[in-house]
Image (spheres, grey):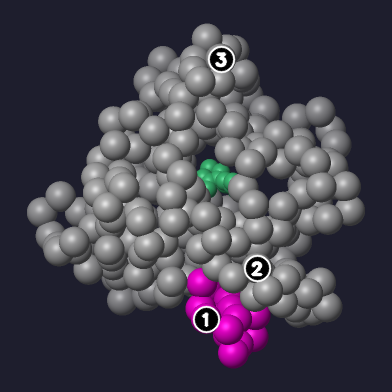
């Protein structure tokens, strides 16, 4: 059942077309908003080329076995907090290294992290967009994920409130994910968002040792399939279920991800990778 609409817009028209888009994403009116041509294609290509040419320097590879016993690898620049939640020290040392990597990656180009934060500021009038801090240490401000032939992402949800207890960002309700697509896979690699909120009972059907939730949880849900194109910015509410189809081909799927969450009482929204 794939009939849940996507709000499609451009940088110049988003505020007029969808002035309350973030609220509407949380209300599940839209599955996602796509801002077409957000980041120039020529710069996307430059960034992908820099990644390809400096993989050893820039890209962290974490290998592990999945539940079926297959070897899978996560490749990224900038530590995604999800990988380090129980290891703060490594997270912050990786974050330090990531600053240098991002400077190298984006050197001389419009900084897509800043561009995303500026876009968010426009969608959140009155809120300051700040990079999340843990005591006095800044979190990584984004994560660039590199997916290769065969990679996928199992059904999951992202909620700092649930998964990052003890971290300051867990105090900020209402989370969003903002992604810039630097390069799309030749086939597959679509993001599917399901119109279904998590309920605590869902955790009872999670199988031990298996990544993600069983697909049966969303088999009767409306859904929406988002096929990002190079240069697109897309924003969705990742507290609802989503997954990424297995991708095929020799072209990596490369995205920059920034999570953000909004404070209820203060005039800030915090962002992290
Ligand atoms: O790469 C994507 O399209 C989405 C990744 C994801 O799971 C997220 O941003 O929460
Ligand atoms: Fe996610």
Q: Nearer the viewer, mark 3 or mark 2?
A: 2
Percent across and percent down for residue 102 are 59, 79
Mark 2 vs 1, N-terminal side: 2
Q: Is residue 172 visible?
A: no
Of 49 and 135, which appears nearest the observer? 49
Say whether marks 3 and 1 touch (CB < 8 Å). Answer: no
- How crowded pointer 3 is (Cα within 10 Å; few <14, some 14-19, many 20+) is rated as few
- How far separated are the C-alphas under marks 2 and 1? 12 Å
Q: Which residues are magenta?
A: 93-112
Q: Quadrant of residue 219?
A: top right
Check residue 1 in the rendering and tell me which mark sits there, or answer none.
Answer: 3
| View extreme (bottom): residue | 108
For residue 41, the mark is: 2
Is there a contact, CB below 8 Å, between mark 3 and mark 2? no
Horizontal side of 267 relative to 59 (left or right) equals: left
**Relative to 185, does residue 103 appear above or below in the rendering?**
below
Is residue 265 in the magenta section? Answer: no
Q: Residue furthest top?
A: 220
Q: Secondary structure at mark 1?
A: loop
- Residue occupied by mark 1: 110
Residue drawn at point x = 79 percent, y = 56 percent:
252
Is the residue under label 1 in contact with that under label 2 (CB below 8 Å)?
no
């Amino acid at each position: 059942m794939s009939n849940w609409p996507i709000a499609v817009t451009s940088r110049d028209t988003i505020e007029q077309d969808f002035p309350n888009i973030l609220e509407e994403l949380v209300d599940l009116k839209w599955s996602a908003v796509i801002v077409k041509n957000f980041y120039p294609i020529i710069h996307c290509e430059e960034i992908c080329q820099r990644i390809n040419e400096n993989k050893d320097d820039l890209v962290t590879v974490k290998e592990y076995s999945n539940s079926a016993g297959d070897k899978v690898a996560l490749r990224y620049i900038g530590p995604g907090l999800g990988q380090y939640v129980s290891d703060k020290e490594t997270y912050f040392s990786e974050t330090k290294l990531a600053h240098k990597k991002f400077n190298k990656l984006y050197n001389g180009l419009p900084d897509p992290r800043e561009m995303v934060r500026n876009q968010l500021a426009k969608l959140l009038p009155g809120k300051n967009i700040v990079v999340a801090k843990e005591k006095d240490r800044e979190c990584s401000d984004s994560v660039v994920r590199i997916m290769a032939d065969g990679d996928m992402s199992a059904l999951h949800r992202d909620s700092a409130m649930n998964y990052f207890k003890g971290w300051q960002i867990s105090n900020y309700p209402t989370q969003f994910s903002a992604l810039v697509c630097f390069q799309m896979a030749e086939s597959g690699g679509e993001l599917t968002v399901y119109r279904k909120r998590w309920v605590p009972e869902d955790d009872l059907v999670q199988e031990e040792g298996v990544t993600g939730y069983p697909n049966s949880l969303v088999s009767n849900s409306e859904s929406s399939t988002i096929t990002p194109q190079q240069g697109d910015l897309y924003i969705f509410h990742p507290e609802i279920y989503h997954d990424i189809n297995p991708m095929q081909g020799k072209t990596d799927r490369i995205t920059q991800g920034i999570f953000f969450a909004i404070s209820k009482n203060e005039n800030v929204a915090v962002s992290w990778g």
